[in-house]
Image (cartoon, coloured by chain):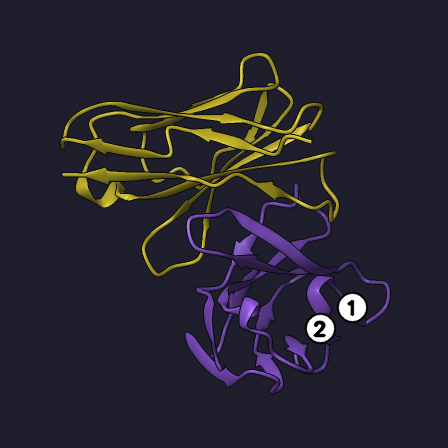
Amino acid sequence: GAGVSQSPRYKVAKRGQDVALRCDPISGHVSLFWYQQALGQGPEFLTYFQNEAQLDKSGLPSDRFFAERPEGSVSTLKIQRTQQEDSAVYLCASSTLAGGPYEQYFGPGTRLTVT
Amino acid sequence: AQSVTQLGSHVSVSEGALVLLRCNYSSSVPPYLFWYVQYPNQGLQLLLKYTSAATLVKGINGFEAEFKKSETSFHLTKPSAHMSDAAEYFCAVSDQAGANNLFFGTGTRLTVIP
């Protein structure tokens, strides 16, 4: 079956531009997570949705970062006025249910380069 | 708060040799522990997870890990390395009361020498 997909796979933005990154989770998955993975580092948690509700956004690094999941399926991570420090791979993951040790299925990521 | 420390950012082993990747965790509550593998330009794939059942956990591709509470460790092992095991490995922790967002270590890159 289809896994988690993300688009675009690669994005180059000039500093100050706005970008939108899309995540299509596995159909029926309740939970959706966004992570940021800087070069040579492990992924770091950004935000979490349970269906359409954003229950945790404690990892968003600034108010330039905004995420939504309006219908409880597709999610978009938006970064306004991009800065060079935003350059990273942005990973989306989904899991079947809320809470618990349920496996998170990761997408291939979007590599954002801010020039 | 939860955190993970992975000792050794790079590990090299010969094909057929034992693989040992180290992970120590810190958690104020009983943890869930995970090992993920990441191949180039791909997303992370779950190898195995500890969920407070058996302390010795077996995963895919012949990997296993043992939860040792006294040592706060969750090291990953494989008896015999294969060339296809070359990848980046991440240990992660989440707490049993939370939403299961993961806290990852910085990763260990495994190289397998033929």
Which chain is rendered purple in the image?
B
Residue placed under numbered mark 1 in the picture: B57
User: In the rendered picture, chain A carries what hue?
Assistant: yellow
Of mark 2 and mark 1, the one earlier in the sequence is 1
Q: Residue A114: x, y in percent?
A: 19, 38
Above or below residue A99? Residue B81 is: below
- Which secondary structure lies at badge 2? strand
Give the distance between the C-alpha atoms of the residues marked 2 and 1, in whole angstroms. Answer: 5 Å
**Amino acid type of the residue tagged 1 in the rendering:** Val
Query: Can residue B73 be seen in this snapshot?
Result: no
Above or below residue A11? Residue A39 is: below
- Which secondary structure lies at badge 1? strand
Residue placed under numbered mark 2 in the picture: B65
Residue positioned 73% across, 49% down in the render = A101
**Residue at the farthest top position:** A71
The quadrant of the picture occupied by the N terminus of chain A is top right
Number of numbered discs overlaid on the protein picture: 2
Q: Residue A85: x, y in percent?
A: 22, 45
Q: Residue B75: x, y in percent?
A: 64, 76
Q: Are marks 2 and 1 on the same chain?
A: yes
Which of B29 and A9 lies nearest the eye of the viewer? A9
